[in-house]
């Protein structure tokens, strides 16, 4: 009898079978699939990739919420406006919403289409990427640029390699790199880090709101008070400074880091070694006179901590061996600060350091695994 | 005399349905199946036809490639039917059991050297119980293993407890060890100093402790005497070791064992005495929509309600099919009914809770993303993810390098369990092993 049953609309043989990936995606988004194990272990852990990915998004929420407040704070400070807490927050929320909408709409559309083409289930990796992208770009970035960058990174960095789990570089970072190199005027300089378009105040170009990183780069550091320009160390620690929305607050990022480490979703080894690398090079640079900043300033300024916690730890693009993670993280931190201190062109080295180490992660793993194998072979020879 | 090995990595899955240490019943079924499919590497040639009388120990099949290796009937009776599958593949020989059992007499004389032991094992059918590593196939009769390993404890979920099932068979076990020691040095691993099996003589005793898979003989071998290319190691299950000893002591093939009936959906938890090949229905009552697994939930075989207990199995697990779909399962902050070893859920708050698990996959198949979880449950000196990928790619050189000789799918069964990407790791490893057998033969 079962054979005579007509296939459902979206089942194989049905009229709309070509849409099955999308339908599956929505269906399994709402309800856990009813599939049972066919081979291998008969019972399976409750964890799945959706849960893993949503944990990262949850870990990003403190940084995102603080970032929204900070968008309002920076604008009101810059223009001398008397805004209350909620006014600042909702201003930031309204400024950020379009970025999230564009990032998710463009990215997910491509994800769904490519899953459809491959006939696979839609992968949930974009839940995280789509949330990351708005947090690492200037809040005023034109939406069409964001759409273009998102499309570029999802197609050319992820889908051409086969989707989540197969990519070599972190897609969110590549989206940022795409913007950085294609539209530098919207991505760098002193005037892009504070939202102004909606503030209704004219003559925006005259107003400058440089990030502490840029100020320090120009050599404005007051060793007596520990302040970089008008920003004190505590301002930078709490995050009351201009910058990409998600990156400014050390406190908010650390909250996320605690969740990521506790759940085991991201590797604490990468975070720790990356910070260690940054501190070491920062200290060497300070000794060598390349900077007047104490080394721990490198950690609280710019995107260093955000990159270490959320971007470098992406399990797909990071090193996979435990020993490799130490090396990989350390080199990211070290390289990022090297770029900051000894490179006249770029003020921020985190993005490029992570992308470079993404490229080398397989090589690091290869070396670690080979070393382990030859050690094992020697041991066996002795035995 | 003994070495203590403490393994830290691994996972004990908290599933409901442990067998109480008591024998519920002893079964002599009407029909017993002799299944050549239980033995990897055996190419069966039928030696009997319908209506032939057999005794317990009479040959039913032989290995086509090594005719002296016999597969024998565990009971006496009459051959009732020969079951064949697609392409006339021999699936089973069904023997109608006599009410009063009679045994082939193999003679009580203890074998004097390795050749005599081998000959006795082949004649009695117990040879098929010897498993050779690498690859986990039936032992080759001309091989010279560097060691023979026996794990006297099983850490798999709800596994039968040999301390209970073999408490009365110590003498047989000792005779079995003595016989096998003529072939190669015997290593016996026990879970504690005071284990009854720690008293076995003529063997190297190793104390091994830790969560599953510490009881897996493959994991123990990789720590005690890792297998190199060209080496072979044999393993034998305690229940079959006892049968070997019993054969030497009494001259009779006695495969009767205590089978643990376990799992959340078993109606009665306990031990049932029966021979391999006993119909599942005679051992346990199977409710509808329940999966019957011969062995444990991690690497057992699906028997089905109308199946027969396998040769190596001393456990049945009954577990319901998890077709139910949970609304917003992955998004719910708390899912009290679902266990996860990952800290992304809150199972860590209730470490002593036992779960009513089902066969739901809890997700869809994805590419590898999280891979550290594999290392956390693999207490061996290998990189699981690299081995798995080498198996997937069919790269023999890499498989060798990453340790294919040391593993069987069961040793990486927990990787199946913990993987958030829901890959079939055991199937991948088996695929790699099959390729190795084909290419290296």
Image (cartoon, grey):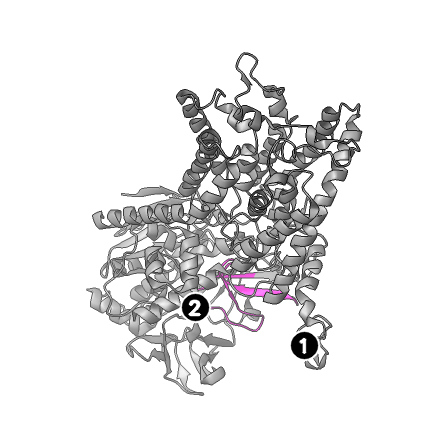
* Residue that lies at the very extreme toward the left in this rendered image: B113
Q: Secondary structure at mark 1?
A: loop
The range drawn in magenta is: B289-317
Specify whether disc 2 shares its chain with disc 1. Answer: no
Q: Is residue B193 visible?
A: no
Rendering coords of residue A109 (x, y %): 67, 57
How crowded is the residue under tag 2: few (<14 C-alpha within 10 Å), some, or many (20+)?
many
Q: Is residue A203 left or right of residue A314?
A: right
Closer mark to the observer between disc 2 and disc 1: 1
Q: Callout 1 environment at 10 Å: few (<14), some (14 to 19), or many (20+)? A: few
Looking at the image, which is closer to me, B184 or A269?
A269
Q: Main secondary structure of the magenta part?
A: loop
Numbered mark located on residue B311 in the image: 2
User: Is residue A14 toward the left or the right of residue A315 in the image?
Assistant: right
In front here: A343 or B422? Answer: A343
Q: Is residue B227 left or right of residue A200?
A: left
Report which quarter residue B248 is drawn in.
bottom left
| Chain at tag 2 | B
Q: Position of residue B104 (x, y in %)?
A: 34, 76
Q: Which residue is mark 1?
A: A13
Residue for point 65% across, 38% down: A138
Q: Is A383 or B285 nearer to us in this picture?
A: A383
Residue B197 located left or right of residue B353: left
Taking the magenta stretch, the answer to whether it contains residue B305 is yes
The x, y position of residue A364, in whole percent, is: 39, 45
Where B208 falls versus A339 (above or below)? below
* Residue drawn at 49 percent across, 53 percent down: B414
């Amino acid at each position: 009898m079962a054979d005579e049953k007509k296939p459902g609309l979206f089942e194989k043989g049905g009229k709309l079978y070509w849409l099955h990936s999308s339908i599956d995606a929505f269906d399994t988004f709402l309800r856990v699939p009813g599939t049972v194990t066919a081979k291998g272990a008969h019972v399976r852990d409750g964890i799945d990739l959706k849960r893993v990915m949503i944990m990262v998004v949850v870990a990003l929420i403190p940084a995102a919420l603080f970032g929204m407040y900070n968008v309002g704070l920076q604008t009101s400070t810059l223009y001398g406006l008397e805004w209350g807490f909620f006014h600042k927050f909702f201003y930031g929320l309204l400024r950020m919403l379009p970025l999230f909408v564009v990032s998710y709409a463009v990215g997910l559309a491509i994800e769904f289409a490519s899953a459809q083409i491959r006939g696979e289930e839609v992968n949930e990796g974009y839940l995280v990427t789509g949330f990351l992208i708005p947090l690492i770009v200037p809040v005023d970035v034109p939406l069409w640029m964001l759409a273009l960058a998102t499309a570029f990174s999802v197609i050319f960095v992820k889908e051409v390699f086969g989707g989540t789990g197969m990519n070599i570089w972190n897609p969110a970072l590549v989206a940022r790199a795409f913007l950085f190199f294609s539209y530098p005027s919207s991505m760098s300089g002193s005037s892009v880090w504070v939202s102004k378009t909606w503030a209704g105040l004219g003559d925006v170009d005259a107003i400058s709101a440089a990030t502490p990183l840029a100020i320090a780069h120009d050599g404005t550091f007051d060793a007596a008070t520990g302040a970089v320009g008008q920003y004190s160390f505590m301002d930078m620690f709490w995050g009351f400074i201009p910058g990409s929305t998600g990156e400014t607050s050390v406190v908010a990022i650390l909250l996320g880091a605690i969740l990521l480490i506790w759940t085991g979703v991201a590797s604490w080894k990468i975070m720790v070694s990356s910070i260690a690398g940054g501190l070491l090079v920062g200290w060497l640079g300070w000794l060598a006179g390349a900077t007047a900043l104490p080394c721990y300033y490198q950690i609280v300024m710019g995107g260093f901590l955000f990159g270490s916690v959320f971007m470098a730890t992406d399990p797909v693009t990071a090193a996979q061996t435990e020993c490799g993670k130490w090396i990989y993280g350390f080199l990211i931190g070290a390289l990022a600060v090297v770029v900051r201190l000894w490179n006249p062109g770029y003020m921020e080295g985190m993005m490029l350091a992570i992308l470079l180490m993404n490229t080398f992660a397989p090589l690091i793993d290869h070396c670690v695994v080979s070393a382990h194998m030859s050690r094992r072979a020697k041991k066996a020879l002795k035995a | 005399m003994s070495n203590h090995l403490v393994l830290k990595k691994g996972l004990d899955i908290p599933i409901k349905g442990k067998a109480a240490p008591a024998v519920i019943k002893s079964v002599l079924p009407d029909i017993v199946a002799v299944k050549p499919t239980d033995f990897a590497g055996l190419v069966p040639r039928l030696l009997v036809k319908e209506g032939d009388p057999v005794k317990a120990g009479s040959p039913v099949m032989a290995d086509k490639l090594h005719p002296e290796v016999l597969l024998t009937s565990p009971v006496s009776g009459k051959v009732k039917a020969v079951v064949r599958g697609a392409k006339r593949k021999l699936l089973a020989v069904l023997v109608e059991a006599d009410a009063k059992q009679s045994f082939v007499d193999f003679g009580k004389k203890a074998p004097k050297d390795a050749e005599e032991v081998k000959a006795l094992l082949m004649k009695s059918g117990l040879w098929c119980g010897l498993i050779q590593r690498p690859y986990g196939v039936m032992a080759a009769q001309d091989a010279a293993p560097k060691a023979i390993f026996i794990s006297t404890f099983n850490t798999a979920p709800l596994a039968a407890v040999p301390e209970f099932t073999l408490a009365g068979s110590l003498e047989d076990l000792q005779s079995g060890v003595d016989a096998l020691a003529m072939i190669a040095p015997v290593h016996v691993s026990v879970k504690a100093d005071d284990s009854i099996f720690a008293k076995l003589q003529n063997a190297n005793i190793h104390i091994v402790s830790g969560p599953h898979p510490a009881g897996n003989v493959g994991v123990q071998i990789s720590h005690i005497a890792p297998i190199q290319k060209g080496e072979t190691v044999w393993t034998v299950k305690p229940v079959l070791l006892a049968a070997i000893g019993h054969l030497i002591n009494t001259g009779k093939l006695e495969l009767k064992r205590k089978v643990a009936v376990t799992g959340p959906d078993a109606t009665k938890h306990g031990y049932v005495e029966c021979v391999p090949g006993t119909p599942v229905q005679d051992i346990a009552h199977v409710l509808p929509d329940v999966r019957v697994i011969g062995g444990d939930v991690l690497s057992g075989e699906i028997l089905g309600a109308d199946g027969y207990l396998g040769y190596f199995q001393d456990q049945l697990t009954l577990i319901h099919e998890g077709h139910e779909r949970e609304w917003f399962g992955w998004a719910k902050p708390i899912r009290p009914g679902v266990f996860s070893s990952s800290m992304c859920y809150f199972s860590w708050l209730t470490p002593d809770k036992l779960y009513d698990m089902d066969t739901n996959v809890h997700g869809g198949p994805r590419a590898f993303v999280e891979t550290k979880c594999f290392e956390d449950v693999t207490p061996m000196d290998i990189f699981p993810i690299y081995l798995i990928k080498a198996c997937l790619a069919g790269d023999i050189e890499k498989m060798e390098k990453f340790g294919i000789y040391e593993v069987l799918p069961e040793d990486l069964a927990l990787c199946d369990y913990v993987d958030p990407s829901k890959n079939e790791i055991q199937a991948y490893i088996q695929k790699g092993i099959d390729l190795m057998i084909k290419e290296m033969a």
